[in-house]
Image (cartoon, rainbow, N blue to C red):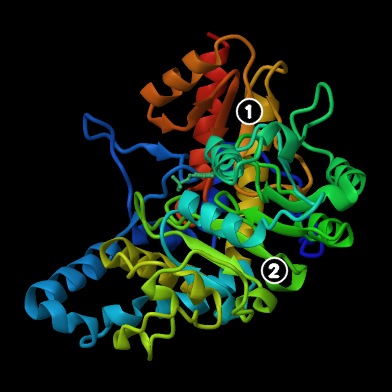
Amino acid sequence: MSTAPAELSVREFSTDADYARHLDESDPLASCREAFELPRDASGRAVTYLVGNSLGPMPRATRTMLQAELDAWGGMASEGRFRGTWPWYKHHEWFREPLGRLVGARPIEVVAMNGLSVNLHLMLASFWRPQGKRVRILMEAGAFPSDTYAIESHVRVRGMDPAQVVVKVKPRDGQACFDVADFTRAIEREGDTLALVLVGGVNYFTGQVLDMPSITAAAHKAGALCGFDLAHAVGNVPLSLHDWNCDFACWCSYKYLNAGPGSVAGCFVHERHANDLERPRFAGWWGNDPVERLRMLDAFVPVAGADGWQLTNPPILSAAPLRASLELFDSVGFAALRRKSLVLSAYMEFMLRHTAPRTCSVITPAATHERGCQLSIRIPGDARGTAKALHERGFWCDFREPDVVRASPAPLFNRFAEAHAFAHALGEILKG
Ligand SMILES: *Cc1c(COP(=O)(O)O)cnc(C)c1O
């Protein structure tokens, strides 16, 4: 993949607890942890939070950002749309640049709106345009359920049968992860029956990063369009959506972006489509030109850019927290986060190799360009019980059927000492 970072320089870790402390002391991002309120368990005890891939913790600045919106609403009500520091009428415009930096897009190509699953439907409406025999949608087997539901229900709504339309690429027998060649081969095989490729950029179950530029190129070569679900990718791995030439992408903001439960999601539409006002879409008044909007015209004329896919006025109380989060990302810089992330997950894996029985395996790919923060650990025997025992000891990670524990040390707030302690706790639990 074009953005593969140089191999880690830190290959020779040590298993000593002192060494973990040394890594924390020399970590230039160590102080970022202070920017968060970290959760406690029901008895008030601090926990090791390794589920930021599921719901990111709260940046402290969120309270101020939200309070400011409550004050604006309380103090100005309708005038808050046009007055104050963050006028609501153009609140969404604030996200273009910082989100563009995170996903590798031009400001005009990104918009913060709705929820992820909603945006998937909006993108399907515009970019799945079945014609003649070119009808099929290619996705990955074992996708996050909402993605499968969105695609299959969308197909049914248009009077077609998912069994005829949806093609799924599977991992090879005995493998947890995909071989990217299987995507390009399946795309070639479907050829002129293929209308759209829509896959998760980072697999939620294994943490595998798919080769998005190659999949996009293969889809385009077959004459199809290509989009990605980036729920587990944004804020986690480097993205260059514009240069990779992806047609569209969607993501949520409550995982690695730490913008809070149900916070406003995001969408990328490549410039060539974003500026194509003829492209069919579902329309609402927030998708038209903001200068014309209040003239309340009958004819919908979309504004150029990803903004032209907005339906409804932005949910300010779920969007303000995203500002707090993106300011944090911008102040640290993604390259520095990625550097720490790779070392932190490599260190955790190194420790697991030392503490856990050989029968445990990390199914996340080893290559740095194929992984982000998350390690998916296959646990023989009672994986669910293991996750529960970890939780009781204050290590919050999660269990996925049938036998996987996912743990995501996040570079913004997790410490090397936490990775060290987690590996020891897992080892002790498994040794009984
Ligand atoms: C988290 C996640 C979702 C969740 O969808 P929402 O609409 O935000 O509830 C969907 N797809 C993937 C791949 C996810 O990881």
Instruction: Name above or below for residue 83 compared with residue 280.
Output: below
Nearer to the camera, 290 or 57? 290
Residue holding disc 2: 240
Q: Nearer the viewer, residue 283 or 370?
A: 283
Which element is circle 1 on?
A: strand
> Which quarter of the rendering shows the N terminus?
bottom right
Residue 237 appears in which quarter of the rendering? bottom right
Q: Where residue 304 sits: x, y (%)?
A: 55, 83
Q: Helix, strand, or loop for circle 2?
A: loop
Identified at 15% across, 76% down, the residue is: 72
Q: Residues within 10 Å of mark 1 (few under 14, many from 20)?
A: many
Dot 1 or dot 2: first in sequence order is 2
* Amino acid type of the residue tagged 2 in the rendering: Ser
Q: Is residue 117 left or right of residue 392?
A: right
Q: Is residue 396 visible?
A: yes
x and y percentages locating residue 47 in the rendered image:
36, 37
Label of residue 377 in the image: 1
